[in-house]
Amino acid sequence: MMAPFRWTWALLPGLWPSLCFAGQPAAVAGSVRVAIVKMPYVGERNVPELSRGPDDLAAGGLATALEQLGARLKPVAAARLAKEEEGEYGAWHRLALANGHLADIVAADVGDGDLTVGLLANCSSLLGMLAGLQRSGTTGRPLRVGLVYIDAHADFNTPETTLSGMLGGMDVAAAAGLCLTNLRLTSKLDVPLPPRDIVLAGVRDTDPLEQELIDRSGVAMLSVKDLRTRSEAFRQTLATLSSRVDRLYVHIDMDVLDPREVSGHSLTVPNGPTSAELAAAVVEMFKDPKAAAIGIASTPTGERDQQGLAVKAAHELIRAAVRGWQQRSRPAPASPGR
């Protein structure tokens, strides 16, 4: 039995053997098929539209690192604007259109049962990743997606609360349906995430009005210490989230790490976990059969990562997701959609 053709904007589709029913993992415990998708669109004003970060991450030995773990890789895909969309204007709008293509790729990969890895220019691609997971069921109805958002910042601002005006500081609030409705819908995230289905982890820098909004919304929060120690709060919070959703998405902004590993990041915050500490937490997250995708955002590369520490850290976090998947004791249940 052969899986459907997989369309990307960057590569010809390939045929892959289907080892399971759609919506279930691609293979038994100990084996994992990995689908990598690059999302280079930045979405911020007055900066280059495309980031080279996702390309650098993909080209920096990632495939070899994953194959050494026994993972099987699909050809790397990339989200790109369609030819007829190239004339569209507005940085946020063009980002949203690209997010829609990202969603299509992610939905197909997750639906095939693959561990899906998003190499993201920045956190604004959160909406596309979530949309893909939401659309990855078998009935056409949206699945319920739980978000574990690991970042030094909450990114829970709205246009009314933001101090910086950065879109990258509003993506979680947009995902929750609190602002930027057109951006969310164009990104194909039709159903916003209930705040109770969001966990913020490692956050240690919020704006005052942003923190008020977090507190009012009832979003769960895990501290850096919780991540470092995989505390009881860590385990209970994630177990509770998993119990009420169909899919889990783990999103990591590299600024969450100790600044020594991501010195080229423009938004570092002191007292973050090391990549080794965070990787141990990611392993635990991906032991859960509902954990379907990981996104790595805002990785400094090239001249901003002259010692290669940030790329190495990013690869280690992706390897951790594979290791967690390989330690699963049972396949994920089929998700018919809601």
Image: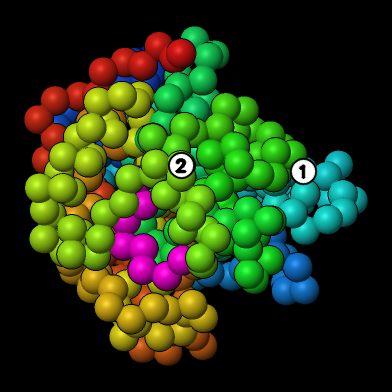
Q: Name the dominant secondary structure of the magenta segment.
A: loop
Is residue 81 visible in this depiction of the protein? Answer: yes
The vertical placement of 125 against 332, above or below, is: below
- Judge by depth and name the residue closer to the eye, 28 or 107: 107
Horizontal relation, residue 14 to residue 234: left or right: right
Q: 10 Å neighbourhood of mark 1: few (<14), some, or many (≥20)?
A: few
Q: Quadrant of residue 188?
A: top right
| Spot occupied by residue 317 in the image (x, y as percentages of width and height) | 28, 60
The vertical placement of 245 against 72, above or below, is: above
Horizontal relation, residue 194 to residue 329: left or right: right
* Amino acid on which disc 2 is placed: Ser
- Judge by depth and name the residue closer to the eye, 220 or 324: 220
Q: Quadrant of residue 289?
A: top left
| Spot occupied by residue 27 in the image (x, y as percentages of width and height) | 23, 29
What residue does disc 1 label?
82
What residue does disc 2 label?
217
| Spot occupied by residue 127 in the image (x, y as percentages of width and height) | 57, 43
Q: Residue at x 22, y 41 (%)?
A: 237
Could you say whether the residue bearing mark 2 is in a helix, strand or loop? helix
Horizontal relation, residue 169 to residue 31: left or right: right
Is residue 50 visible in this depiction of the protein? Answer: no
Q: Residue at x 69, y 45 (%)?
A: 180
> Would residue 202 be counted in the magenta stretch?
yes
Quarter occupied by the N terminus: top left
In magenta, the rendered stretch is 199-206
The vertical placement of 307 against 267, above or below, is: below
> Would residue 295 be counted in the magenta stretch?
no
- Judge by depth and name the residue closer to the eye, 303 or 280: 280
